[in-house]
Amino acid sequence: MSSKKVTVASDWLAGCAGCHMSFLDIDERLVNLLQVASLHATPITDFKHPPPEGVDVGILEGAVNNSATEEVAKRMRERCKILIALGDCAVFGGIPTMRDRGCRIEALRRAYVESESTVDGKVPDDPALAVMQDCRPLDQVVDVDVYLPGCPPSADAIFYALTSLVEGKKPQLSGKLLDWH
Amino acid sequence: MSESALVNITINGQAVQARAGQTVMQAAEAAGIHVPGLCNHPHLRPEGSCRVCLVDIERQRTLQPSCTFPVFEGMVVQTDTEKVHAARRFALQMIFSERSHYCMYCQSSGTSEDTDCELQKLGYEYGLDSWSYAPDYHKPWPLDASRQYFVMDPSRCILCRRCIRACSDVVANHTLGLRQRGARTMISADDGSPFAESSCVECGTCLQVCPTGALSDRRSAYMGHNAQVKRTPAACVGCAVGCGIEALTRDNQLLRVEGDWNAGNGGLLCRRGRFDVVEPQPKRVLKPMVRRGGTLQDADWDEALALVAERFAAADTVAGMASPRLTNESLAAFTCLFHETLGSSEVGLINGEVPPLDLGTPGRLQDIGGADCIAVVGGDPLEDQPVIGYMVRRAVDNGAKLTVVNDSPTALEPYAQLHLRPQDISHNGVSPFARLRTVYHLRVSGISQLRSTLEAAERPIVLYAAGMSATVYAALRALPRKVGFLPLVKGTNAVGALRLGLTCRELRGDALYVLAGDDMPGEDNGWRPRDFTVVQAAYQSEWTDQADVVLPARIWSEQTGHVVNLEGQSLPVTPLVQAPKSVHADWETLLQVSMRMGNALSYDEIADISRAV
């Protein structure tokens, strides 16, 4: 193993942040991991965007569902050597695809107008906002190197994948680590 | 080559002896070599549609589906090579890509250890961590939730066609088929109508064989994976067929009922036996109740039992009526209470009909499906004993000749080749008009027709109901010896009750004891209230409304004992869930009543009597 630490950055797209919670669930092993890897930008730290000079490993959670998430996905792809699709949404499309199964307008109305906690709601229409797209898994937008399915993937699976990459091996999930239910 | 001839084959380098006619998959499984599959099901005919069971057979041009490929002498098979694995992975990828298998919101989804989905299980086994071909979830396949008890989500369907085979080959209902072609193919009921408006009878056999979450049971969904539930073999007490069931329970809750493939019913169940029995019923009787000032009010056991004993001792005449749904043990205790303690023979059943049981060789349920000639004399099995109705239709599908003898149209009539009226067979062929028939070339009398059809058959069976005239039964008795007879009994344990001397008849008495169990009033109340009426029942109903004293009783899934089905077989009734603490077994309550009247009956005596039944 080289003395230089493996650099890691993560970001999230259309997801629920649950995969990042699972990432944190690797608990005290995080300390061991940080001895061989350095964590750069993540949505849960102060730095939000991966550095322009790039990182070794990029991690993306969530599906691509609009122009904003598409941009985030493409930027991460440009700035990392190995891209991990983290969780069922990034791997398969997941829960966010439900939006497209019925009528999209209805989904927007339900969220912004009809929801019980909303008073005088309005579907946002500012032209500066992201444009909706078909909700799709990450690999339909950018090339993905490692798939980590699961809702969320277990902390063990995430730890296994990252330590494998640090050791220079491609992770091959099987058994309990693959459970994507 | 006969069916039993042995064939030598090699599987993965291991010498295996298979029976001629077996498929490669069957031979491999018998030798302990597992071959994965999705469309195959041990109790359905093979179809070969999923391509997951592909194996490498020497000198075959391509990989072959092992579930349909028959063994031959000298065959060399590889089930576990990388080539085979790659083909299986590809097949799984194709299946996943065809629909929207978003496991995270499917009730069958689980871990590699507890998933109920056979597709997901194979996905894990073959290391699928992503989809090579992204599915198009925009495909318009709406959920069909029109049926009361189970839902179909076509976007989880893998077109294995197990449901179609179950519907056609097992239930012989022929509701399910395929519509459209290629990637648009989908399971369809009749002409594509919603299931509830189709010819579907909601027997749920398709639900039992579905490998994924495409069909899911509303009641038990999300209540536990198969790995977490307990499966208990038991007998259905819905009707006198007494189908073998597997009851799925968890934490003292009955979740679901499945048909036992190895019992006489061969996995079949009807809507009543699979679903209705699990449905929550009206309000349960949990405490004794006594009528005070015109209204029923809660009472403690002592007060209620003392009142029953006092009023029954004071009554001039007493009568007892029991439901035929109860076990031999309950009925035996009831009979003892009346015969020995009360000295009354006015004890019988609320309902239930048993035709004469001595017409000839008794038939077995299994005989129906394999019969080549069936006569249904009276009754309407598709309505009253649906599983028998399904078996009859299955036999007809396989070429059996069906004769229906009935005055009124029955649900089986469309499948019959010969229709007769009871009077056609009631004179044993020698009616006063026989000569006239011959002279004027009128059709031969019914009994001759029936006799000749049954005589020509190898495995004939007669199903007959109660309520026919004595001459009809006499005509049936005179049928050839090879004919098997199966009575279409109404009332689950009516045969057991009959052996205890209980029948459905008019009963006289000033004080009436109704042992209802979990039975409910049908269209006809079954009895009228007397000067003093006790109802021992599990649920509140019109019956308990009319009572002076109400005593709690257990329901079918809490009972222990035996029932006798229409074959005359004694079936154990196993408790599947615990009864509420305040609710005692029928015999316990009845022994209490007897004791308070000064006669201590023992359970051993009752057990002896029911064992004799």
Image (cartoon, coloured by chain):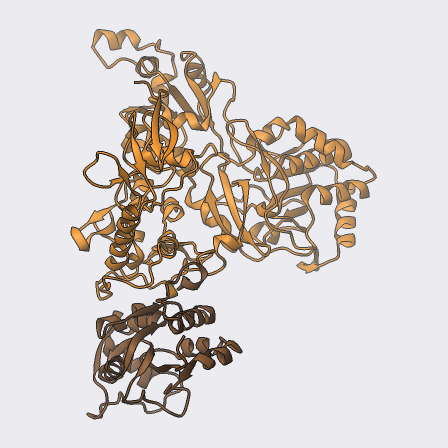
Chain colours: A brown, B orange
Counting from the top left corner in percent of width and height, residue B466 is at 47, 27
Q: Residue furthest left?
A: B181
Front position in the image: B426 or B101: B101
- Please name whichever residue, B355 or B484, is drawn nearer the observer in this view of the structure: B484
Q: Quadrant of residue B606?
A: top right
Q: Which residue is at the front of the view, B527 or B250?
A: B250
Determine whether, in the image, residue B534 is placed left or right of residue B209: right
Seen at 30% across and 75% down, the residue is A83
Taking the image as drawn, is residue B408 in sight? no
> For the view shown, which residue lies furthest in the right direction?
B598
Q: How far from the left and from the top, in percent, is residue B476? A: 42, 16
- Horizontal side of B259 relative to B457 (left or right) equals right
The answer to whether residue B204 is above or below residue B446 is below
Q: Tell me the quadrant of the picture where the N terminus of chain B can be found.
A: top left
Reply above or below: B374 against B589: above
Q: Front-most of B393 and B313?
A: B393
Q: Is residue A88 visible?
A: yes
Residue at horizontal 38 percent and vertical 86 percent from the top: A40
Image position, residue A116 (x, y; %):
39, 83
From the viewer's perspective, is residue B371 above or below residue B214? above
**How far across and how far down the image is residue A49, in percent?**
32, 89
Quarter of the figure with residue A177: bottom left
Q: Is residue B94 left or right of residue B206?
A: left
Instruction: State whether residue A137 is above or below residue B306.
Output: below
